[in-house]
Structure formats: C-alpha cells, structure tokens
Amino acid sequence: MNIGEKIKHSRKKAGLTQKELAENLGVSAAMIAQYETGKRNPKFETIKKIAKALNIEPHTLLPNADYNRALGDKALTAYSVILEQIIGLKGYTFGITEDDDSLYINYPDGILKVSLDITEDLQENIESYTEFKMQELKKKYSEYFIPKKYFDFINRVTKPEYQKEEE
C-alpha cells in the first residue's frame, strides 16, 4: 500500500470522513482526497499530523511492502524497505514485477527495474549523502550544538553545567 491508500484505510478504520479528517487538520477535504488518490504526497510533518488525528503512529502511514517473495533475498528486503521509506515521501514507490519477481521503482514517467547491486548502490549513496548533509547542518548551526555529555536525554534538557561553561 502507498501512503495515500494507508491514509484512506486508516481514516475509514477510525470512522472519519475526508471532511472530518480535513477539519481536524485545518485543510480542505479536497487536499485529503488528493493525498488518498496519490495526486499529492504529504510532507512528513503532515504525515505526523494525520497520524495524530487518526490516533496511529506516523510510521504506519509510510510506504512499505512485503519483499520477502522477491528472490527470497533478505538483503534486498532490508534495502527495499529502508529505501521506500526515504524516497516514498517524494512520491516514488517500490513494487515487485509479476513476470520475473524483480524489484521496481515507480517513477512519474516510467518504471526502473533494479537488481540487488543497484539497490545496494542506491542505499550507499543515500546514506553517504545523508551523513554529508547532517555534518553540513551541524557546521551551519554550530552555535546550537550541545555535546552529548551536556544533554540529559531522560528529561530532554541541557544540563546546568553546560550553561556554566558557556559563561
């Protein structure tokens, strides 16, 4: 199921109409319809709001698929699920072809069949780029960076001794 189908399924399960869900979110019913039909893809922040309105976890709306029948390959399965969650938010979806059980990526203008090697390469590129962008973000906003030893993860606050060191 893609995101739109999951939103529709979850909305119906919650006993809400498109109009009721839209009112909860402060958007139009037409927007909900576009999400459900796949004409528009909600941003992750919107997915979180939809999930909250439907009383479900956001990850349950993310695209995923059962790839276990695809070649029975656990590596292909793991890569596929991770990739689909990342790029699914951008409107691309994954599937399995019926004729030869190949993994495919659904683009707006066609289908790309991919092998395990291509999937692994794509995963590595996404991971590498993500790490690069996270480090770039850390540098850009370094004045907000707090070393882990000064952050209380239980209470989710900066420890007092960090404030003392700043002064």
Image (tube, grey):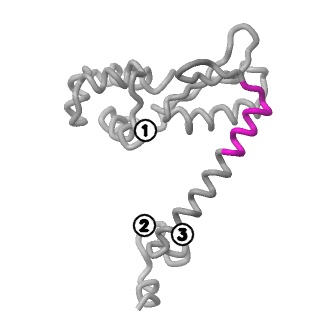
Tell whether 122 sits left or right of 13. Answer: right
Three-letter code, disc 3? Lys
For label 1, the SS is loop
For label 2, the SS is loop
Q: What stretch is highlighted in magenta?
A: 114-125
Tell whether 8 sits left or right of 31. Answer: right
Which residue is disc 1 drawn over?
57
Tell whether 165 sits left or right of 116. Answer: left
Q: In this view, does 69 lie above or below 64?
A: above
Three-letter code, disc 2? Arg
Which residue is disc 2 drawn over?
156
Q: How crowded is mark 3: few (under 14 residues within 10 Å), some or many (20 or more)?
A: few
Q: Residues within 10 Å of mark 2 (few under 14, many from 20)?
A: few
Residue 101 spot, x, y in % from top left: 73, 15
The answer to whether mark 1 and mark 3 are in CB contact below 8 A is no
Residue 122 spot, x, y in % from top left: 70, 38
In the image, residue 15 lies in the stretch drawn in magenta: no
